[in-house]
Image (tube, rainbow, N blue to C red):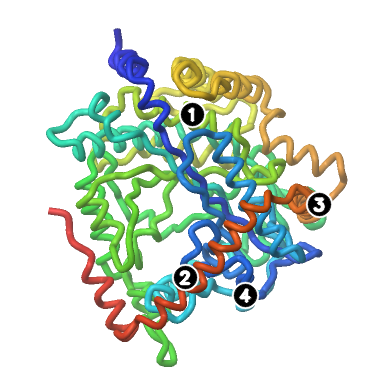
Amino acid sequence: MTQASDRRRLLAAHPELLRAIRRGIEKEGLRVDAEGALVRTPHPLALGAALTNPHITTDYSEALLELVTSPDLSPNALIQELTDIHAFVALRNPGEAIWNQSMPAHLPAEADIPVAWYGTSNTGMLKHVYRQGLAWRYGKIMQCIAGVHYNFSLPETAWDLLSQGDTAQERRNTGYMGLIRNFMRHAWLLMYLFGASPAMSRSFLQHAGLESQLTRLSPDTYCLPWATSLRMSDLGYKSPTQSELHLCYNDLDTFTARIHTAVTTSWPAYEAIGTHRDGQRIQLNTNLLQIENEYYATIRPKQTAGRCERPNTILHERGIQYIEVRCMDIDPWEPAGISAETCRFLDAFLLFCALEDSPLFPIPGTCQESQANFARVAREGRRPGLTLMHDEQTIGLQDWAQDILTRMTPYAELLDAHTDDTQHLSALQRQHAKVQDPEHTPSARLLTALRDSGQEFHDWTLAQSQAHWAALHARGLPGDTLAAYDQAAQDSLAEQAALEAADTESFEDYVARFHSALVKAA
């Protein structure tokens, strides 16, 4: 009996642990007007304060909403809640829609893209200045790309059965780092199965200077013919500067030590920008990373941070609380941007990553082979006969994909047998059709829809987004649910006002205190 099957057997003997799995979603989306143009108005007051509303905030831009669920016990409950949040936004902000696609709508001139504003409290100003720094470092255009982040955790007592270590925290950290390594080995499969951004508007290309690298599909639409996710390719949300980072995923201590180095090491190009212009702070520092969250990754170990806490410090001190999958594209056919079926697949996939053997990566602790596979599938995953590298051997994408799906089967069966949701195996089995025929993938379906309809990428996406928005508005919400979201919005405004009233130290002193909260891993 293999170690992986031993771990499955242990979980099967403790089904309460499987039923205690938590998953959550953070879904981004640009607010657009009736023509599909990015709106430049402030965050709607009816949605509350972006700083303090736990369910409705903003990401980079004032126009880039981020809708956040609670940690839920089932995929159905998760999508129900995410859909409810979308419906609330539709009801309270009916004159706009959320752009339901990862690649942006038509954007204004870069100077006119509004950076998110969180009020005048020191906490709010820190978030705003950090985003100003992103604009100086990478430009605002890239920051308008949107996605779906999927959060996942096993109960701590599960790691006592599944992992090694002298303490509960050590076992939890070891288990999650093993999950992360396996995720990185196999994440290319998510790009193939769920990547939905093979095309983009010419206006984005012109802004980003990428027009010569793509194929013209129609006057305003460009694509890579075999791409699955331009968002996750080198043409999307990437930072060449961060290629200088060499993180280690073999253990949490080394991981946090290298993040610490990145957020404390000054970088010449950012030194040239400086931290202040005309008496105003324009970035938090000149380091390779202003803060830990600036590191772009397909998956992150996470720990909940409080006000003025440093994520890296509390991650080192308290350990990994959950993992955040960051590579999922928005599904343009789903009103909430992701389906319950996709969530079921992700749960089985992440359980597979957690329980399968996960050898350490070679020094320095990353896997170049895995990174190359991911990049190749993002750019040309549907290319006929595409091959990848697996343990330094060439393998066909279809063969490897079928092997992974087969190995995932016991995990889907485990979830079906021991949770209240019996549709994990069917969610997995539906993916076989995509492997057998790439035309069933979301990326191929989107290109087919553009060709068949004769529409531009922008017009097709706008029609989809407006149809979803109309359906969400018509769906409405039960009175008590609507009242609860209204109350949360009002409470968040009061909480932000209280923070602003209570702040007595200067912003510069607050920034210094924030930086001093960063503690180097021993």
Q: Amino acid at mark 3?
A: Ala
- The reply to whether discs 4 and 1 touch (Cβ–Cβ < 8 Å) is no
- The residue wearing badge 3 is 463
User: CA separation, marks 4 and 3?
Assistant: 24 Å
Query: Which of the two discs, 1 and 2, labels the residue nearer the N terminus?
Result: 2
Mark 3 vs mark 1: in front: 3
User: CA separation, marks 3 and 2?
Assistant: 30 Å
Can residue 136 be seen by looking at this rendering?
no
Left/right placement of residue 107 relative to residue 495 reads right
- The residue wearing badge 4 is 42
Q: Is residue 383 above or below residue 406?
A: below
Left/right placement of residue 137 relative to residue 381 reads left
Question: Residue placed at 19% from the left, 28% from the top?
Answer: 164
Residue 94's disc number: none
Left/right placement of residue 500 relative to residue 162 reads right
> Which is nearer the eye, 496 or 395?
496
Q: Is residue 474 above or below residue 74?
A: below
Query: Which of the two discs, 3 and 2, labels the residue nearer the N terminus?
Result: 2
Q: Is residue 501 above or below residue 351?
A: below
- The residue wearing badge 2 is 131
User: CA separation, marks 2 and 4?
Assistant: 16 Å
Query: Which of the two discs, 4 and 1, labels the residue nearer the N terminus?
Result: 4
